[in-house]
Amino acid sequence: MHKQYYGYEEFKFDVDELCVNFENETFDAIVGIARGGLTLTHFLATKLDLRDVFTINSILYDDTNKQNDAIVFNIPDLNKYKKILLVDDIIDTGETMSNILNIFQDKFPNLECKTASLFYKKTAIMKPDFMVKEATAWIEFFWEVD
């Protein structure tokens, strides 16, 4: 399996690139998918001056091995919000993001959800609303390996 290291300096540049997409967007809150999306969520919340920051847990991979079904838990109460940004580090298969969007649609039918990630694979079942790069290898994020 080909692996690609993704370092802090590249990450900082890509966060700025991602934020350019939000110039005409306003969000009431940001939700990071733990664990991979948490570093990006923190940086985006700071840049977008969002104080309402939530996490949701989803487990689809055990190390580099994909599991059969995603487990989603720690669902935040988003009833008072109109529009949120849902964030993960990578849209690999798209299953995690898609599952969470379905849960949000069921639990919060009036909530508008936009999605963002650093990386996206063209083979995923969904494409995020906002992303920076196409993933062509297994990404080794600095927050996982440093």
Image (spheres, rainbow, N blue to C red):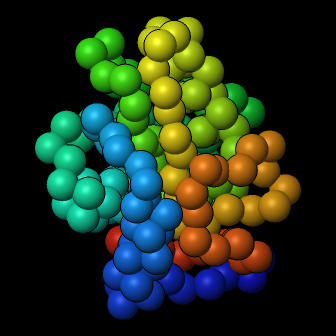
Camera-nearest residue between 118 and 59: 118
Q: Is residue 17 above or below residue 131?
A: below
At which x and y percent is residue 101? 58, 28
At which x and y percent is residue 20? 44, 70
Q: Please indicate whether residue 27 sits to the left or right of residue 134 in the image.
A: left
Q: Is residue 110 above or below residue 136?
A: above
Identify which residue is drawn at 49% across, 63% down. 21
At which x and y percent is residue 118? 53, 66
Q: Is residue 2 above or below residue 122?
A: below
Residue 48 visible: yes
Q: How many numbered discs? A: 0
Residue 33 visible: no
Q: Please indicate whether residue 54 sits to the left or right of residue 136 in the image.
A: left
Q: Please indicate whether residue 127 sits to the left or right of residue 118 in the image.
A: right
Identify which residue is drawn at 42% across, 42% down. 85
Q: Is residue 104 above or below residue 125?
A: above
Identify which residue is drawn at 56% across, 16% down. 105
Identify which residue is drawn at 35% across, 81% down. 12
Dividing the image into 4 quarters, which one contains the C terminus?
A: bottom left
Dividing the image into 4 quarters, which one contains the N terminus?
A: bottom right
Name the quadrant containing residue 19: bottom left
Q: Residue furthest right?
A: 123
Name the quadrant containing residue 14: bottom left
Name the quadrant containing residue 122: bottom right
